[in-house]
Amino acid sequence: MSQDVLTRETNRRQLQQIIAGLSDGVILLDPDQSILWANDAALAMHGVEQIGELGGNAKAYAKQFALRYRNNHLVPPDSYPINRLARGETFSDVLVEVTSDARTWVHRVHSLVLADNRGEPESLVLIMDDVTDWASAEQRFEKTFAANPAPAVICRLSDLRYIKVNPGFLEMTGYARDQVIGTSTYELDVLEQAENKELAKQRLREGATITQMQAQLRLADGGSKQVIVAGQPLELNDEACMLFSFVDMEARHKAEVALRQSEERFAKAFRLTPMPTLVCGASDQVVMDVNDAFLVTLAYSPEEVVGKTIAEIDFFHDKGARTRLFSALEKTGSLDRVDVRVRSKDNELIDCAVCADTVNIQDSPCYLLVMMDITERKRTELELVSAIEEVMKDASWFSRTLIEKLANVKNVNAPQLPSVSFTDLTARERDVLELICEGLADKEIATRLKLSTNTVRNHVATVYSKLDVHSRSEAIVWARERGLFSSAWRPKGQG
């Protein structure tokens, strides 16, 4: 054996001894492509225990193990790292998935060619690092990043170029993937028109967290979109990066604009309506706002009304009516033309038909009350009713139809607050009311019921009190509105 051969064998044994205990996997190839040796780490990374299980040479290795690139494409046999090494190539950081017997590892591989003193290849070294755990974590990150509904991009801090983008960002902006990947933050500035752009840029240069802030994101079609942007530093493939995430605020922005416009229209209508109008809290009845018509009609100043409760202002003439009105409003949520009497600051009484509804202001339920002044109409009606009463004092000769038509002039055609029920009357009081509706006078009722005239008069007074009416015509209208005594409405002389 020549001295050169002995020297080469000695060097090889020494090299094997040095690398045997390394955590990196190492495979030695002879220049003739045969596998000479592998350390325990290399065997474990292939799921074998004996060197012979790696195959006798580079070609046998390629048949024994299936390799894929990280993009899941198969590695052609000629491009296997061991075959490239056998051809004397040097390379580094080649990532491949190695599969054998349904088990897969991820190797980061590089090569080393050792030459003799003549410069001829003496040993070919394949060095591999098991990065399966890292690749698995990266794969989970990739899946999470892609599945995240929040739009996001990742830029590399070394050159500020985007290296990853998820579907959410592409969908939101209208860009294609190749329009983003490789583009610099100067070309596609996600911090454009940010509310604190200079601070955000400084944090980006420092690789520090960028707190949430509003910004306008440029879209593929040349438009822009209101977003909330935030940046979180991270390491990806051992490189410092910045993850930008976004919240699309366009829908919220449009809703805010629409709400603002709606509020402006409401405020204008509220101010300009000629009828006294107020808004109060539903829970506490504290007045939040009143319009000019309210202040003029009731002679109050804003300071005397806003911020005080309805009870404190005390402009309802009848406290009971006020209580009934708000009780009905709480139960039904709205009221339509309820007659109430209000009192101005200078004690002028005003008859009003109140319409009310529940509205939400700043996410709080409120009551909107609109009061229509019907004082003149009431006065005219009362004068007419008085005239009717005067005529009807001796009007037994009137037909029931005519009495009904005359009495109905008093009806305002408006729903009233809940009042007494027919069942609240005693049996005798119901008989008296029925005979009143037939048009009988007190003496006739006394004869019909075999009572004294004074007793009938007492019953009539009690009926008036319970029904909250003040005349026979009002009692007739009350009964007619409730469909009582239908036989009493036929004109006299008809069966």
Image: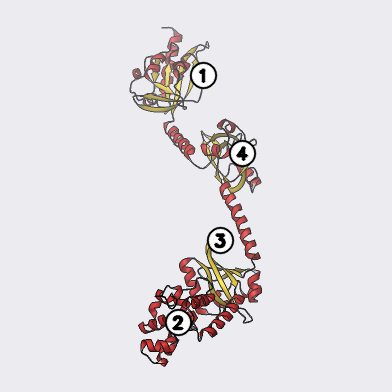
Q: Residues within 10 Å of mark 1 (few under 14, many from 20)?
A: some
- Alpha carbon distance from label 3 to label 2: 57 Å
Q: How crowded is mark 2: few (under 14 residues within 10 Å), some or many (20 or more)?
A: many
Question: Is label 2 in a helix, a strand or a loop?
Answer: loop
The numbered mark, 4 or 3, whose residue comes first in the sequence reads: 4
The numbered mark, 3 or 1, whose residue comes first in the sequence reads: 1
Task: Report the residue marked by disc 1.
Answer: 90
Question: Is label 4 in a helix, a strand or a loop?
Answer: loop
Q: Which mark is residue 219?
A: 4
The numbered mark, 2 or 4, whose residue comes first in the sequence reads: 4
Q: Nearer the viewer, residue 367 or 91?
A: 367
Kindly identify the amino acid type of the residue bearing the numbered disc 1: Thr
Q: Is residue 175 above or below residue 317?
A: above
Q: Is residue 185 left or right of residue 491?
A: right
**Whole-percent x, y for residue 417 in the image:** 48, 73
Whether residues under marks 3 and 2 lie with C-beta atoms below 8 angstroms apart, the answer is: no
Kindly identify the amino acid type of the residue bearing the numbered disc 4: Leu
Task: Report the residue marked by disc 2.
Answer: 439
Whether residues under marks 2 and 4 lie with C-beta atoms below 8 angstroms apart, the answer is: no
Pair 1/4: label in front: 4
Question: Is label 3 in a helix, a strand or a loop?
Answer: loop
Task: Report the residue marked by disc 3.
Answer: 362
The numbered mark, 2 or 1, whose residue comes first in the sequence reads: 1
